[in-house]
Structures are given as C-alpha cells and as structure tokens.
Image (cartoon, coloured by chain):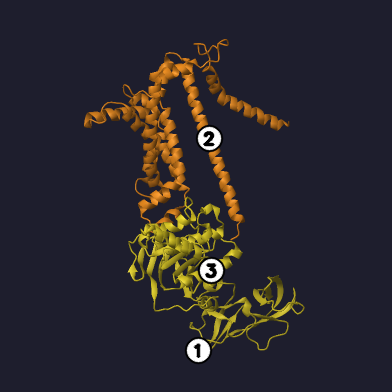
C-alpha cells in the first residue's frame, strides 16, 4: 500500500452537491467531494454505483442535473469537453484505429495549434516516457493490450493536463501485466505531478494506486479515506463487507463506557470486548466486524473468557502465501480465518475436523452502527 | 461420395444454373451472327459484329453517357444527404420527431416506384408553375428524383455503420480538444468511409438501372440507358442489346471480384498483424 503525503491545503477539484438523473433513475445522488492537487483519488464501487457518471461529468460528457463542479476554482457549467483542462483515458482506450501511434498521440497537440516541430518533439518525448518509442509507426491493431494501454496513457498525458481521469485503467489487462502497470502508473504520476482520478470496481487496484479512496454505493459516497482508513476503520457494514473479506456479527451493546464497550453477539459464545469507545445509543443494535487475518487459531483454550469462540475446522484452502480456514462455530456460524504460511513445514498446523479456539485482540474488532 | 455430399453438389449446381443460365445464354447469343435473337447461326458464329454495331450506335452510347453522369451525381448527392440523415438519427439522441424522421427517410424502401414517379412528376410540374424552377424536365429532375429514393438505402447503410461504432472514439477526440466539426472530419468520416463507399456504389447501381421513376421525370433528350434499351426492346430485341448487356455484366463482375479479392487480402494482413502483436511481449 502506498501512503503519500498530499498537501491538503490545495484543493483542485470541488464537487458540490452534484446530482445526476437519467429520467427517473438517480445515477449520482448529491455528492460533495474535494480532490487535492497531486493525489491519486480512486472512486471505488460496484457496477451501477454512479462512479463512471461522476467521472463523465468531470470530463464534460454529462452535465449535472443539479450542483456544481469546480476545477481549479473555475465553475465547469456549460464548458464543453474540448475546452476543459482535463483529459481522460477511456476504458476501451478509444485509440483511433485509422491513425498510427504517433498520429494518435499528436492529435491532441494539433488541436492546440502548436508548431509541427514542437508537436513531433513532444510526441517522441511522451512515447519514450511510456516506453513506446519504437512503435510510433504502428497502427493500434498491431499492438498488444498492454501497449495499447500505454499509448492511450501517452495520448492523454501529452496534453499536460492538470487532471487526468482514468476509467478502469487496468481493466483490460491480464493479471501479471496489471501489477507491473500499477506501479508504472504511480511512478508516472509522481514524475509528472498530475492529479489522477481513477474509477475502478477492483478494490485491489484502488488499494495499490490510491492516495485516497471514495467508496460509492447507489449514487452516494459512503466513505472517503486513505486505503488504511477504509480497510481498518470502515464506517458502515457496506464498506466493511465491500473492501476485503470480513466476518460480521450482529449484536447488542451491553456496556458502553468512554474507554471501552462490551457487545453480546448471538453467534459468539463469549462477549466481545473492544478497547475504545463508540458513539451509539444504549442498547443499540450494532455489528462487530473482524478481519480474517486478525483472528488467531489455537488448539488450547485462550486465556480470559472474552473475545473468543470455539468451533470445528470445516475447510482449509492453501493459497501459497497464506491459508484460509473456514471454522464452524458451535452456534453454526462459519467464520473465515487467514493464517500466513510463515513456516515451510506444516506439521504443527491444524487439520480438517479438528476442534479449535478462535481469539482476537481487543483492538481488532470494528464496531459498526450503520 | 456420400448421399449428403451428392445432394449438396446437386443443389449447388442447380442453384447456380438457375441464377446464371439466363445471363450466360445472353452472353453467348451476343456472339451470334444471326439477326434473329433466338436462332443460333452455327455457320458464321461466333462474331463480333454486334459489338462493332454497338460502338457505332451514337444514340445508345449517348444514353449510356447520360446514365453514367446521372448515376454519379445521384450517388454523390445521396451519400451526402444519407450521411447527414444517418448522423442525426444515431447521434442526436431522442428528439421530438425522431421516429417520424426515421420512418420518412426509409419510406422510399417500401414505396412503389410508380407512385414515387408520379409524385415527383407532379412536384416538378407544380414547382415550375409556382417558382419557375426546375425549367422543364431533364437530367436535373432525374437526379433529384433518384437522390430521393436512393438516399433511403444509403441512410440505412450509414446508420448501421454509425450504430456499430464505438462512441468513445468521438468522445476521446473531443476530450483531446477537437471541436465537433474537426471530430466529424478527422474521426467519424474516415471511420465510416467503407460505408460511404458501399452506399455510393449502391446508389450508383440503383440509379443506373432505374426505369420507372426516370420514365416519369425525364424530358426530351435525357433518355437514360435503361429507358433507351426498354424502348428498343419493345420494337423487338436486337442482338446489339445482348452485346451491351454482356459488356455491362463483365464490368460489374470484374469490379465485384476485384473488390472481394482486395478485401480478403486486407483481412488476412490484418489478422496476421494482430497475431504478431499478441505474440509480442508486453
């Protein structure tokens, strides 16, 4: 996970109460958001959550039904796409099939009316940056998927935009190429100092790329934060469940102190003790979220009579770097636990149908009220 | 040979015979020495005398020249108007009267030609009375009438090409700073060029062999080739018409074969290049 320091004083894009309706369908529902200069901001959400519509409104292909969008302090209302200081990399890449790689990249500069020599100099320079210098004379159909992606990126970046919009930038690449390209994208972004807004449905992609993530659901932004914030401190059942995998237990507050809380969950045979306070009504129905990697598995009963459960191992999936255990608790609930395979020999590991104890630290559970 | 193979070969042979025997017999009889179209003069045939006669026939050659000009002008006009109509129907989203426009542009596809012809004639006559234009009937009125009915076909061809076209390409061009007019001429037009070419050829062919509509809106001295042939055939088929038809068939066949071979070759080259790109790492 990359953690970048972003100058929060410098707001570059400001989205104010933007709503977009298509007939009766509300695609974007009153979103307000600030995007800072030089950051990689990811809009993450499932299909139909409105993330692409929001991106298209930034580019100028759609106009908000209500609300305002300001880029660098300027209201974008009524400004057509070709006059915005914004460029976009399309999901399909949208390379012009009848032009060579060079002409594709030069197209945007020609619209600015630059001199021919200046255009060819900047095109060559940009193709070198994306390592496509040798392919200038090829047509898009003569390129592989990864090469097309880089040409699309070069074409958008050669205009030196302050803001680059990327629609599922790695969606069309195979897995190995994706990982490599992710890091290339981050390097390029740092090198050129462009603000990136990335739309993706892939949480792994968002986690690696983003300095901040905005999780979207049903046209609204449900949480904004750094990848760590979103993962470790989700603010709702939706976010906890959407990002990574999580064990969610519904329960009731039985003790609510400023420094700690106790929650009783029907599916767990002990109370859950959390070492920080929360803001919720007394006796409120809450959910406890515990990440699979924060649960420990042992044969012996753990000390203390809280933050523990007993069950039987039902499934083990060996993933190489770690193993996933599905444990059926005495209440019948199946809990997911992941254990890193830090040792090579597996003599000590628990096996199928073995009774085990689960336990976790008081700092591990996240209490969710919504 | 299995029963199925035998059946397939017979079906193919019969099908081809059904389609091509009339044309072949016409071609064969164009080399017949006899003045009677239906009697084969086995003594003096084959001969090229009808071809010679044909090229001495100023009237037929003149009609062919008129037809060629009309077809070229019609095709060009129909492609321009058809492109505009196709663009409006696929790109302007839902607007008031869109369904009506769509129905009206394609109506000539199902409209009986004879009705189109009468309607056109009435229009031209009353226009001349009202505003004095077009004066009389001639090539201009034929071209206008032909554009009207061929445009429907061109619109359908161009509309389907535009519908199968990735909108993101035009959006990308706009995003890169191109004004709508630039987007049209540098991105949209080159990409629908194949549809423009096939639309042009379609309109050309339709105009080239139209008799019914031309009959109504033609004036003295503007007889097209099909009209000329038709009036000659009424007085009895003469063998030089066979010769003319043979030449036309050969020209069309050469064009079709050449373009098919060219397209096949392009397709193969493209596939090969795509394969090479995939095997290229990265």
Query: Which-is-in-front pick, marks 2 and 1?
Result: 2
Q: Quadrant of residue A346?
A: bottom right
Q: Nearer the viewer, residue B58 or B169?
A: B58
Q: Residues within 10 Å of mark 2 (few under 14, many from 20)?
A: few
- Which sits earlier in the primary sequence, circle 3 or circle 1? 3
| Residue farthest right in this picture | A347
Query: Which-is-in-front pick, marks 3 and 1?
Result: 3
Using the image, name the chain to which the residue with label 3 belongs: A
Q: Position of residue B180 (x, y in %)?
A: 36, 53
Contact, CB < 8 Å: mark 3 with mark 1?
A: no
Q: Quadrant of residue B208?
A: top left
Residue assigned mark 1: A258
Q: Which colour represents chain A?
A: yellow
Instruction: Tell me how many marks there are.
Output: 3
| Residue farthest front in this picture | A117
Q: Residues within 10 Å of mark 1 (few under 14, many from 20)?
A: few
Residue assigned mark 3: A184
Can residue B44 be seen here? The reply is: yes
């Amino acid at each position: 996970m990359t953690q970048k320091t972003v100058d929060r004083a410098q707001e570059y894009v400001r989205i104010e109460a933007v709503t977009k309706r298509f007939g009766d369908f509300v695609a974007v529902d009153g979103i307000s958001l600030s995007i800072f200069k030089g950051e990689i901001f990811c809009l993450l959400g499932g299909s139909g959550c409105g993330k692409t519509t929001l991106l298209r409104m930034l580019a100028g292909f759609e106009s908000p039904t209500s609300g305002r969008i300001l880029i660098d302090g300027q209201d974008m209302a009524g400004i057509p796409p070709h006059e915005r200081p914004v460029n976009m990399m399309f999901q399909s890449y949208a390379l012009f099939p009848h032009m060579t790689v060079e002409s594709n990249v030069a197209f945007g500069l020609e619209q600015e009316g630059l001199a021919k020599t200046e255009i060819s100099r900047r095109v060559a320079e940009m193709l070198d940056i994306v390592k496509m210098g040798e392919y200038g004379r090829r047509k898009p159909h003569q390129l592989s998927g990864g090469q097309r992606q880089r040409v699309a990126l070069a074409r958008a970046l050669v205009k030196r935009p302050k803001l680059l919009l990327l629609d599922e930038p790695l969606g069309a690449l195979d897995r190995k190429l994706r990982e490599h390209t992710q890091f290339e994208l981050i390097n390029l972004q740092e090198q050129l100092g462009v603000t990136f807004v990335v739309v993706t449905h892939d949480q792994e992609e968002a986690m690696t790329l983003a300095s901040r993530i905005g999780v979207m659901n049903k046209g609204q932004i449900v949480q904004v934060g750094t990848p760590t914030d979103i993962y470790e401190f989700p603010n709702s059942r939706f976010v906890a469940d959407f990002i990574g995998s999580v064990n969610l237990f519904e329960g009731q507050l039985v003790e609510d102190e400023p420094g700690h809380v106790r929650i009783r969950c029907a599916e767990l045979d002990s109370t859950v003790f959390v070492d920080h306070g929360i803001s919720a009504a007394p006796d409120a129905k809450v959910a406890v979220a515990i990440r699979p990697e924060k649960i420990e598995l042992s044969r012996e009963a753990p000390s203390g009579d809280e933050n523990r459960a007993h069950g039987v191992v039902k499934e083990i999936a060996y993933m190489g770097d770690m193993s996933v255990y599905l444990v059926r608790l005495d209440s019948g609930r199946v809990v997911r636990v992941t254990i890193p395979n830090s040792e090579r020999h597996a003599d000590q590991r628990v096996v199928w149908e073995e009774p085990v104890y689960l336990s976790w630290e008081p700092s591990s559970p996240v209490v969710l009220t919504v | 040979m299995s029963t199925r193979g035998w059946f397939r070969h017979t079906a193919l042979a019969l099908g081809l015979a059904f389609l091509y025997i009339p044309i072949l017999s016409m071609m064969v009889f164009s080399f017949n020495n006899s003045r009677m179209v239906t009697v084969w003069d086995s003594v003096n045939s084959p001969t090229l005398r009808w071809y010679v006669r044909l090229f001495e026939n100023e009237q037929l050659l003149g009609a062919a020249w008129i037809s060629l000009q009309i077809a070229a002008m019609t095709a060009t006009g129909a492609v321009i108007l058809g492109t505009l109509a196709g663009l409006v129907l696929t790109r302007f989203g839902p607007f008031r009267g869109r369904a009506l426009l769509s129905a009206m542009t394609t109506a000539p596809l199902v409209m009986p030609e004879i009705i189109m012809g009468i309607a056109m004639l009435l229009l031209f006559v009353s226009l001349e009375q009202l505003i004095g234009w077009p004066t009389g009937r001639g090539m201009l009125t034929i071209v206008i009438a032909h554009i009207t009915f061929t445009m429907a076909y061109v619109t359908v061809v161009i509309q389907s090409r535009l519908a199968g076209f990735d909108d993101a390409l035009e959006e990308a061009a706009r995003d890169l700073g191109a004004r709508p007019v630039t987007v049209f001429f540098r991105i949209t037009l080159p990409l629908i060029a194949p549809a423009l070419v096939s639309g042009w050829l379609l309109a050309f062919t339709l105009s080239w062999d139209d008799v019914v509509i031309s009959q109504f809106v033609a004036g003295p001295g503007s007889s097209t080739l099909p009209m000329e042939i038709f009036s000659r055939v009424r007085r009895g088929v003469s063998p030089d018409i066979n010769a003319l038809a043979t030449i036309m068939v050969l020209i069309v066949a050469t064009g079709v074969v050449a373009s098919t071979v060219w397209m096949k070759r392009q397709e193969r080259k493209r596939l090969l290049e795509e394969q090479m790109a995939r095997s290229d790492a990265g």
